[in-house]
Image (cartoon, rainbow, N blue to C red):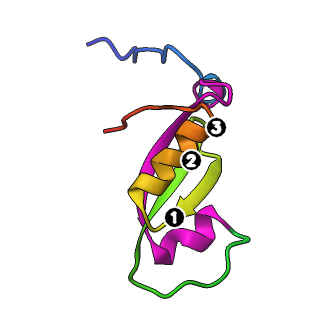
Amino acid sequence: MNDISPQPLLTDEQLASLGGGQIAYLRPIRSEELSRLFPAAPPVQPGLQLFALLGADGTPIVVTDSRDAAVANALSHDLQMVSLH
């Protein structure tokens, strides 16, 4: 048996830097997750569905209660949206 595992094509740091401020993704979150992603955000009612716009490296950009508003924000800042699965 061969115990050699395949090497990743990119390091974690290289993967995080992809997009260089030009790529973002939208992530649905619950209001309970808000303080973890956006530590400066004020307290919000529990149980709300929110949408976080994040940079390719996971940097929080904006949070809103509307998917359309998050997408509009990305477009207004010339960010290319990508889909994550």
Q: Give whichever of discs 1 and 2 has the lower sequence position.
A: 1
Classify 61 as above or below 32.
above
Q: Give coordinates of residue 70: x percent, y percent.
A: 49, 52
Residue found 38% across the figure and 83% down from its top:
47
Classify 28 as above or below 2.
below
Q: Give coordinates of residue 55: x percent, y percent.
A: 60, 40
Location of mark 3 (residue): 77
Location of mark 2 (residue): 73
Checking the image for residue 64, the label placed there is 1
Distance of mark 3 from mark 2, alpha carbons? Answer: 6 Å
Q: Give coordinates of residue 17: x percent, y percent.
A: 66, 27
Is label 1 in contact with label 2 (beta carbons under 8 Å)? yes
Dot 1 amino acid type = Thr
Q: Which residues are magenta?
A: 15-38
**Residue that lies at the very extreme toward the bottom in this rendered image:** 45
* 17 part of magenta stretch: yes
Q: Residues within 10 Å of mark 3 (few under 14, many from 20)?
A: few
Q: Nearer the viewer, residue 1 or 56?
A: 56
Is label 3 in contact with label 2 (beta carbons under 8 Å)? yes
Q: Give coordinates of residue 35: x percent, y percent.
A: 61, 73
Which image quadrant is residue 29 in? bottom left
Which image quadrant is residue 85 in? top left
Distance of mark 1 from mark 2, alpha carbons? Answer: 10 Å
SS of the residue under disc 1:
strand
Please indicate whether residue 55 sits to the left or right of residue 70 in the image: right
